[in-house]
Image: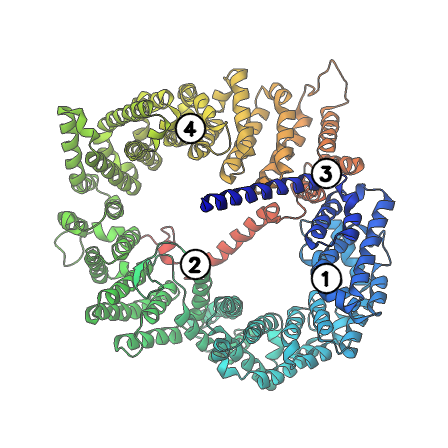
């Protein structure tokens, strides 16, 4: 009984809390609630109540401030300022009410973003004057200045219009002298450690943008360096020095930077000797660890901007090399975040050295090819300078190679990892952070390898020898070494790569033979597989090694240790894709091509593999067979490859002929599924050459499809909605899905011989399309939609006559499934809109022939698509809309279409454009709007109802309509601003960049977007940057791994 009471009490409390939450939400949404804020703040003793009142006030300041009467704005501004001064003038109340004061500071800064400088010109002088009246007020003034700087310089993008940001920055710049004097005065005069810390924190926020004279032409740097040795201020001072180190002003202040660095290095050696950093970090307090992390930030910032000035004289070079030694020591610290900071810098440092070396190398090679000596002046003085820099950094670079090799991150292909208990297991989840780290480390090591192949090779071989003789043996050491060896694939010239790999593979195979223990063998197997998978060029050039490696993989396919078989099958597929011709050509010393030998022993090789591994294996062999150019041989190999699954298929179909019930047996259903998946794997690899095999099973497959489909429908009809979730129905549906996937794969891949795939379409119309229409919603396969999208994309206008039939079968019934809400049937959604897009792109004539009700249904469904917050669906809908708009613009039905849909589409697009949930679609929203604003000029009939009004032109009508639409949607924006925005759209409609920036500014001004991450509004610019980076990587040997290149490396 007491237990019951306790439960009831808990439910009651929960109910009361929910009710209270609802009351607070209603209060917060009340338009006039903010008028009570002052009353609450003056009379309430409860901190939570005060915070609630401030929350209400913050919302009003952000969204409605400019709409308030002047006296209300001034009253609130003065009240907030007075409370802050009152609380911070007294040491006791300031410390006790610190959280409350901090929140008031934030509110004040929100007010400043509206009021200052135009309506509150004296703010900075007032603040500085107040700061001089007491130490606690001064401390709080520092906090307000820090907040203001962060709001304007760090968080402003996407929160304020570009014009407003510019205005605030220029005001802060022009009034900074007062702030600067205050900071220097405080640091020289006060004894209060809290005030010193607050001042250093404020300086840290300001240093990245203040006019440079305030740093170098005042005692500021000296003052900071004076505080650096003091433990209490060391971290804050170091953060300030890091901001200064990151600044770049050409050569003007070089001497000051050298002086700052030299004094800093002398002080640092007394605080922390360079040789003990990893230990100091491991045994240090939180502050000491933070100091080492801040040191990494200081050195990386300084070297990124000013390393060149330290290369100029011997004493500077000594200090520079000492700094690099510190940074290398910090890089060995066992902390991921610290390592990331160092790694980012090492990547930039080595890239810069590599690029200089890379520019000189071709010229040097040309000179030596002409048989000339390296006479000074033949390759200009830059060559000597580059050589000199390489010599200067040869020591640090060698240590850096050691660092990269012994800390190399795990590549994606490696599936075997050590768990927290020290056991070797199969990896279950990919760690994205590790993959990003691997990418940067790999790139850095490739540059290091290019700078000195000899040292790279020697270090790797020396470490491998230590693995073999047991001196340095451990799983981690072997892993990082092999990952490093694999990562530099493609960076050496072929002759050196051959010599190096012969030794590496030989040693690894020996290590596998001599090492005992299942876990040890699994680790070595994983490393052998990773390394050989990275070097296709070497394997293509050395048949004996290739054959040995593949046979070793077959051996690993019988190894039951978790992850080893998976990795063996994945590596086999990877190698075959890059060396496939080698397996169908009869090699010297062999009696037959390797593929024939493999097919003879196929049953034995795959004996211990799981079904999904067998599918990968079959796909690999499919790639081999695809490389055979002789049609007869290719068909014979395919027949031999498929003989096991075909035998089983014939057996099942034969038994089904005797009794159809055999197909309901779950083991039989699983066998059928497995056979279909095997076929799909081979079809993926063989493309059009899979034709003989699919012809063999196609009609039987459709019969099985129909039968299983009817079984699904009847089971769901009898068992109700829950039956669709039963394991039996799920299994039956996976057969249907795999059948559709197999057909889609073949149609998609049969691009060289389109007529082959086209003949499979008519027999599918009823068993597949008719079945879809007849089925209950829970039994409809979304793959039907993607199959027909693929067919239309492949056969384009040839499918025109079939579109009405497709439309009739899938359109209405699918729309009913997906328009009830945004969640049900997620797979059907994207595939439905992809099908619609295929029809809109390739069979536009079929859309024109639809009745007006059907066309309205299409447009409504597109609007529904781009209202989705699911990015793929929304983007598919927007892309389809853009294509349909362009097609109608070029058709004879242009006027009729736009008269019916123009205003509806404009309204819908503005609705998603100004709703922050749909930010990822920004680029396409802008393109659709630009199209609409441009198309009005070409229309020859009015868009408005001519009987009720008259306008000079469609453009004038659209202008007025858009102003009214946005004015009603954004009552917080003045009518003049809305008009200015719409006029700006019309004037910039032919210039996409201006048009887009204009919309960005309006979105920020609308406040919907002002407190969020707005990177999606700039996604297009980011994509251009990524493409440039890809082109750069293509130009450097090894940066894109040979195993990832799209057959630029065709094997011969």
Dividing the picture into quarters, in which one does residue 486 lie? bottom left
Q: How many marks?
A: 4
Tell me the residue that label 4 is attached to. Answer: 796
Q: Residues within 10 Å of mark 2 (few under 14, many from 20)?
A: some
Q: Residues within 10 Å of mark 3 (few under 14, many from 20)?
A: few
Q: Position of residue 193 (x, y in %)?
A: 71, 75
Label whose residue precedes the other's in the sequence (1 or 4): 1
Asked whether 350 or 295 is in front, the reply is 295
Q: Is label 1 in a helix, a strand or a loop?
A: loop
Instruction: Work out how far the residue at label 4 is from the one at label 2, CA to CA, in angstroms.
Output: 40 Å
Asked whether 453 or 830 is in front, the reply is 830
Tell whether 624 sits left or right of 652: right
Residue 821's disc number: none
Instruction: Work out how far the residue at label 1 is from the one at label 3, CA to CA, in angstroms.
Output: 28 Å
Instruction: Work out how far the residue at label 4 is from the one at label 3, CA to CA, in angstroms.
Output: 57 Å
Label whose residue precedes the other's in the sequence (2 or 3): 3
Q: Is residue 1024 above or below residue 687?
A: below
Label whose residue precedes the other's in the sequence (1 or 2): 1
Tell whether 829 sits left or right of 70: left
Q: Pointer 4 and pointer 3: residues touching (CB < 8 Å)? A: no
Dividing the picture into quarters, in which one does residue 34 lie? top right
Of tags 1 and 3, the one toward the viewer is 1
Tell me the residue that label 3 is attached to. Answer: 30
Q: Position of residue 201 (x, y in %)?
A: 69, 68
Q: Is label 4 in a helix, a strand or a loop?
A: helix
Residue 435's disc number: 2
Instruction: Work out how far the residue at label 1 is from the one at label 4, CA to CA, in angstroms.
Output: 71 Å
Q: Is residue 788 above or below residue 980?
A: above
Q: Residues within 10 Å of mark 1 (few under 14, many from 20)?
A: few
Tell me the residue that label 1 is attached to. Answer: 97
Of tags 4 and 3, the one toward the viewer is 3
Q: Is residue 258 above or below residue 942?
A: below
């Amino acid at each position: 009984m007491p237990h019951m009471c306790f439960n009831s009490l808990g439910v009651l409390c929960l109910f009361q809390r929910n009710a209270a939450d609802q009351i607070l939400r209603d209060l917060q949404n009340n338009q006039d609630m903010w008028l009570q804020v002052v009353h609450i703040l003056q009379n309430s003793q409860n901190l939570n109540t005060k915070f609630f009142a401030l929350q209400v006030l913050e919302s009003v300041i952000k969204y409605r401030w400019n709409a308030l009467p002047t006296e209300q704005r001034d009253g609130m501004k003065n009240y907030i300022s007075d409370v802050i001064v009152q609380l911070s003038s007294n040491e006791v109340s300031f410390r006790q009410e610190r959280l409350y004061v901090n929140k008031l500071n934030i509110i004040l800064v929100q007010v400043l973003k509206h009021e200052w400088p135009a309506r509150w010109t004296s703010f900075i002088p007032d603040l500085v004057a107040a700061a001089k009246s007491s130490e606690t007020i001064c401390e709080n003034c520092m906090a307000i200045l820090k907040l203001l700087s962060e709001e304007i310089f760090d968080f402003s993008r996407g929160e304020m219009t570009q014009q407003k940001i510019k205005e605030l920055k220029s005001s802060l710049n022009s009034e900074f002298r007062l702030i600067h004097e205050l900071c220097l005065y405080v640091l020289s005069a006060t004894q209060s450690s809290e005030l010193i810390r607050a001042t250093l924190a404020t300086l840290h926020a300001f240093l990245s943008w203040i006019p440079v004279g305030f740093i170098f032409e005042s005692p500021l740097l000296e003052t900071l360096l004076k505080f650096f040795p003091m433990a209490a201020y060391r971290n804050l001072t170091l953060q300030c020095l890091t901001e200064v180190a990151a600044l770049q002003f050409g050569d003007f202040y070089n001497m000051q930077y050298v002086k700052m660095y030299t004094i800093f290095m002398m002080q640092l050696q007394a605080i922390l000797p360079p040789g003990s950093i990893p230990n100091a970090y491991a045994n240090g307090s939180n502050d000491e660890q933070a100091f080492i992390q801040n040191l990494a930030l200081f050195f990386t910032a300084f070297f990124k901007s000013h390393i060149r000035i330290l290369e100029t004289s011997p004493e500077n070079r000594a200090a520079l090399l000492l700094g690099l030694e510190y940074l290398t020591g910090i890089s060995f610290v066992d902390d991921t975040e610290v390592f990331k900071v160092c790694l980012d810098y090492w990547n930039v440092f080595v890239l810069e050295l590599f690029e200089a070396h890379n520019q000189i190398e071709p010229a040097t090679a040309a000179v030596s090819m002409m048989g000339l000596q390296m006479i000074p002046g033949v390759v200009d003085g830059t060559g000597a300078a580059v050589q000199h820099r390489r010599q200067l950094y040869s020591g640090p670079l060698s240590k850096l190679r050691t660092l990269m090799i012994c800390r190399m991150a795990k590549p994606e292909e490696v599936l075997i990892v050590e768990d927290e208990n020290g056991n070797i297991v199969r990896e279950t989840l990919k760690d994205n952070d590790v993959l990003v780290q691997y990418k940067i480390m790999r790139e850095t090591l490739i540059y290091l390898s290019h700078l000195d192949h000899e040292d790279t090779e020697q270090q790797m071989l020396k470490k491998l020898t230590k693995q073999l003789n047991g001196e340095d043996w451990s799983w981690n050491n072997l892993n990082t070494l092999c990952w490093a060896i694999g990562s530099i694939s493609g960076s050496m010239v072929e002759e050196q790569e051959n010599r190096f790999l012969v030794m590496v593979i030989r040693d690894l195979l020996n290590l596998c033979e001599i090492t005992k223990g299942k876990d040890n063998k699994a680790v070595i197997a994983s490393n052998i597989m990773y390394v050989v998978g990275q070097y296709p060029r070497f394997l293509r050039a050395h048949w004996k090694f290739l054959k040995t490696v593949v046979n070793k993989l077959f051996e690993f396919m019988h190894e039951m240790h978790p992850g080893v078989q998976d990795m063996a099958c994945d590596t086999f597929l990877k190698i075959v894709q890059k060396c496939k011709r080698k397996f169908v050509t009869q090699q010297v010393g062999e009696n037959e091509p390797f593929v024939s030998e493999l097919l003879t022993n196929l049953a034995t090789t795959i004996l211990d593999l799981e079904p999904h591994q067998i599918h990968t294996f079959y796909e690999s062999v499919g790639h081999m067979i695809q490389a055979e150019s002789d049609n007869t041989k290719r068909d014979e190999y395919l027949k031999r490859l498929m003989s096991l699954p075909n035998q089983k298929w014939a057996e099942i179909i034969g038994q089904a002929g005797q009794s159809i019930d055999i197909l309901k047996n779950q083991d039989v259903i699983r066998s059928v599924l497995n056979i279909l998946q095997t076929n799909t794997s081979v079809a993926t690899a063989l493309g059009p050459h899979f034709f003989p095999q699919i012809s063999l099973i196609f009609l039987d497959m459709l019969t099985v499809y129909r039968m299983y489909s009817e079984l699904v429908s009847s089971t769901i009809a009898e068992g109700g909605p829950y039956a669709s979730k039963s394991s039996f129905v799920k299994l039956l549906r996976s057969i249907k899905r795999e059948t559709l996937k197999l057909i889609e794969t073949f149609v998609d891949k049969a691009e060289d011989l389109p007529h082959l795939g086209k003949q499979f379409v008519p027999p599918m119309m009823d068993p597949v399309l008719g079945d879809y229409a007849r089925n209950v919603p829970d039994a409809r396969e979304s793959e039907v939609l993607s199959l027909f999208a693929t067919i239309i994309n492949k056969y384009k206008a040839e499918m025109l006559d079939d579109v009405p039939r497709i439309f009739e079968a899938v359109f209405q019934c699918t729309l009913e499934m997906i328009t009830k809400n945004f969640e049900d049937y997620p797979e059907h959604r994207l595939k439905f809109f992809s099908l619609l897009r295929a029809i809109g792109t390739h069979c536009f004539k079929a859309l024109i022939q639809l009745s007006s009700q059907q066309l309205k249904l299409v447009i409504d469904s597109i609007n529904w698509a781009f209202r989705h917050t699911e990015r793929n669906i929304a983007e598919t809908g927007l892309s389809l809309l853009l294509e349909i708009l362009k097609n109608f613009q070029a058709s004879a039905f242009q006027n009729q279409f736009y008269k019916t849909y123009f205003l509806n589409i404009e309204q819908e697009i503005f609705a998603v454009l100004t709703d922050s949930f749909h930010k990822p679609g920004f680029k396409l929203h802008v393109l659709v709007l630009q199209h609409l604003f441009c198309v009005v000029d070409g229309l020859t009939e009015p868009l408005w109802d001519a009987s009720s009004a008259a306008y000079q032109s469609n453009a004038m009508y659209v202008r007025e309509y858009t102003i009214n639409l946005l004015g009603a949607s954004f009552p917080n924006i003045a009518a003049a601003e809305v008009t200015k925005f719409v006029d700006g759209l019309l004037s910039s409609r032919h210039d996409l960049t201006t048009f887009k920036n204009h919309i960005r500014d309006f979105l920020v001004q609308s406040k919907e977007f002002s407190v969020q991450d707005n990177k999606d509004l700039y996604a297009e610019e980011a994509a251009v940057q990524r493409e440039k980076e890809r082109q750069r990587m293509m130009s450097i040997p090894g940066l894109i791994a040979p195993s990832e290149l799209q057959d630029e490396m065709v094997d011969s």
